[in-house]
Image (spheres, helix red, strand yellow):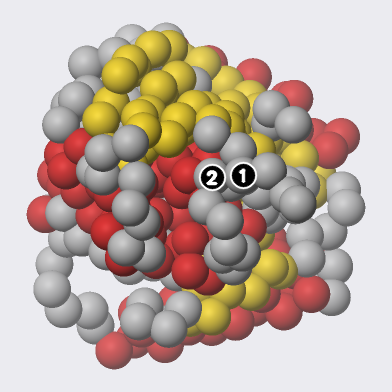
Amino acid sequence: MTMVRTSATAFAPASVGNVAVGFDILGHTVAALGDRVRVSRRTEPGVAIRAITGVVKDLPLAAEKNTAGMAALALQRELGLPFGFELEIEKGIPLGSGLGGSAASAVAAVVAAAALVDRPLDRTRLLKFAMQGEAVASGSVHVDNIAPSLFGGLVLTVGIDNPHVKQIPVPESVRCVLVHPHMVLATREARAILRRTVELSDVIWQQANLAGFLAGCYTSDLGLIRESLLDVVIEPQRQVLIPGFVEVKQAALAAGALGGSISGAGPTVFAWAESDDAENVRAEMVAAFRNHGLESDSWVSAIDRDGARVVDG
Ligand code: HSE
């Protein structure tokens, strides 16, 4: 007889939303950082958050207002479980950084909670619970952080009600460079400034870029990736929110990056580069932010396929 666990800890990686060409539908993981959530069973239904530690502590403790709490609550309610959960959240991802912190907490919570349930739950099911958590933080339903954090790698999601999740291969030599300037940008704010309509010519250009980028990834065509890793719709509207963005991106391209843009809703800026160029790209981007009075944290990360997982056995 299999013993059902009474507690589990899960890790969920950070992620780069949009990846320039796939607003709200494309994202990839960043293995270098992530959130951990420990979930324990409790007798009463519902969810209680016991502790929030790590790089962010000032988050709501009420389950319905917390991304991890709401995601676990959605799982508990929709499965009709006769028991509830207690959560301890350890934040590794800075708040308002554009690195998918709210998504990672929601994903880690559902992965840990699922380990305490006596029936198998596939990841598409978990995705839907985590989406309810993410909606608490950003005020909208988007999957470009949740899906990669849960599944791992570069991930395309088609559909919201019945999401199809596709992991896209990334050429071996590609690294992601991330530079997080020390400022906070709320996703809600960065979404609120977006115009509701898009010029037809920009739609065509962006479609070509998304198609070219995906084809480039599938065929390891770095020239095609370089040509198409360009956001002509969202980045021009949001770049004013990030001091020095234009110079930082220019510095990345001048140092040999394949392309880059705002990570998620910002202010982190990401670039894709070949492994031999990545450290130089990182140094030049950090220097460009410094020229605008912003210190930053930075990482060079492979885009591996490891998504969220239980880490305590
Ligand atoms: N796709 C979302 C946005 C991600 O750019 O608004 C937010 O993390």
From what the image shows, is residue 220 above or below residue 134? below
From what the image shows, is residue 244 above or below residue 129? above
Q: Which mark is residue 4?
A: 1
> Element at badge 2?
loop
Label 1 is placed on what type of residue?
Val
How many callouts does the rendering have?
Answer: 2
Label 2 is placed on what type of residue?
Leu
> Element at badge 1?
loop
Q: Is mark 2 within 8 Å of ligand 1?
A: no
From the viewer's perspective, is 250 left or right of 194? right
Alpha carbons under labels 2 and 1: distance apart: 6 Å
Please report the residue visible at 79 percent of the width from the left and 75 percent of the height from the top.
218
Please report the residue visible at 48 percent of the width from the left and 61 percent of the height from the top.
126
Residue 139 place in picture, x, y as percent: 16, 54
From the viewer's perspective, is 258 left or right of 157? right
Label 1, residues with CA under 10 Å away: few <14, some 14-19, many ≥20: few
The quarter of the rendered structure image containing the C terminus is top right
* Residue 150 in view in this figure: yes
Closer-to-camera residue (37/289): 37
Provide the residue designation for mark 2: 116
* Circles 2 and 1: CB atoms closer than 8 Å: yes
Residue 45 place in picture, x, y as percent: 26, 45
